[in-house]
Image (spheres, rainbow, N blue to C red):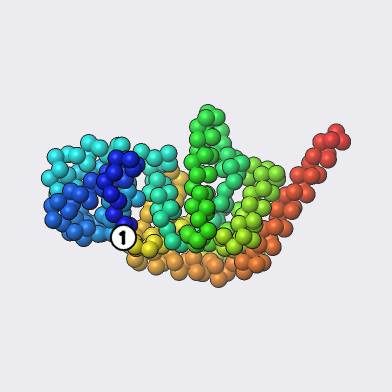
Amino acid sequence: MPKPKTLDPSESTRALYGAELRHQREKAGMSQEDLGAAMFVSGSFVGQLEAGVRRMRLEYAKSVDEILGTDGFFVRNLEAARKSPYEHHFADVVELEGLATTIREWGPTLVPGLLQTADYTRAIVLAYDPVLPEDLVEERVAARQARGRIFHDPRTPRYSAVLDESALRRPVGGSAVMAVQLRHIAAMARRRRIIVQVMPLSEGANAGMQGMFKLMTFEDAPPLSYTEGSETGRLFDDPAVVTRSTLTYDLIGGAALSPGASLDLIEQVAEEYEDAQRSRLEDRDLA
């Protein structure tokens, strides 16, 4: 489970909120498992709440106040503890990425967010909401770019991804943006910071056709699976669900190109985009 945080006003609001939860639980003489059973969640889930990783929901805050006799403290302070630049359904995932020892992702349509360049993200944001004000566009781009800081540590998380070839060939943002995006992925792979495979279009049906998902493992907490849809997402810690997702990822990886062949393809497609961009510029100059 996540290591306990010290109740320190200099820490984030969510960490302070989680530390108070731990303080009140211990004051009541309850273990994480005891409190989890009373809340109808797992003890590891309580541990993640206390570490400031999981976002407290209203129903849990009400339950904690009732079980621990905290006179409405957790409900009153819920909004401050839930502040995040990310969408409600995704905020937990971002926090967990920073704690994960391994992350594995399946990207059937787009380059996963952790690997995106700013221009690629900007194109996606504008495609989703073409009339979004510029300041909000840049806020979302910055938030997604901030997630990539987890790669500043050369050791953790150990990251791997399988990308469908369609994600490489869909010209998000145009040829210039895609060339830079694919070169970025290739550079990370060549530095041996990430492992990337590509599912070729020639493979046809594969185990991941139902949509994207992410698997995360932790040193002191159970593994999790995350799936996402339009305006929604869900984290699973049910062992049966995580096991099925792990099998699905293994099947996808087994059907995909090897890491070496995948890297060659990524660089080949990047070169195709670069050639297309050069031709476009030459045609413009001649016009």
Can residue 50 be seen here? yes
Q: Secondary structure at mark 1?
A: loop
Q: Residue at x 39, y 61 (%)?
A: 218
Q: Residue at x 70, y 57 (%)?
A: 267
Dot 1: few (<14), some (14–19), or many (≥20) neighbours within 10 Å?
Answer: some
Q: Nearer the viewer, residue 174 or 147?
A: 147
Q: Nearer the viewer, residue 240 or 80?
A: 80
Q: Nearer the viewer, residue 131 or 145?
A: 145
Tell me the quarter of the image containing the N terminus: bottom left
Q: Residue at x 74, y 53 (%)?
A: 271
Q: Where does label 1 land, which residue?
A: 1
Tell me the quarter of the image containing the C terminus: top right
Asked which quadrant contains residue 33, the reply is: bottom left
What is the number of callouts on the image? Answer: 1
Can residue 128 be seen here? no
Residue 81, x across and y down, in percent? 31, 40
Q: Residue at x 20, y 43 (%)?
A: 62
Image position of 61 (left or right of 211): left
Q: Nearer the viewer, residue 165 or 3?
A: 3
Asked which quadrant contains residue 177, the reply is: top right
Residue 196, x across and y down, in percent? 58, 61
Above or below, 117 against 131 in this view is below
Residue 139, x across and y down, in percent? 50, 35
Image position of 225 (left or right of 36): right
Identify residue type, mark 1: Met
Above or below, 252 against 183 in this view is below
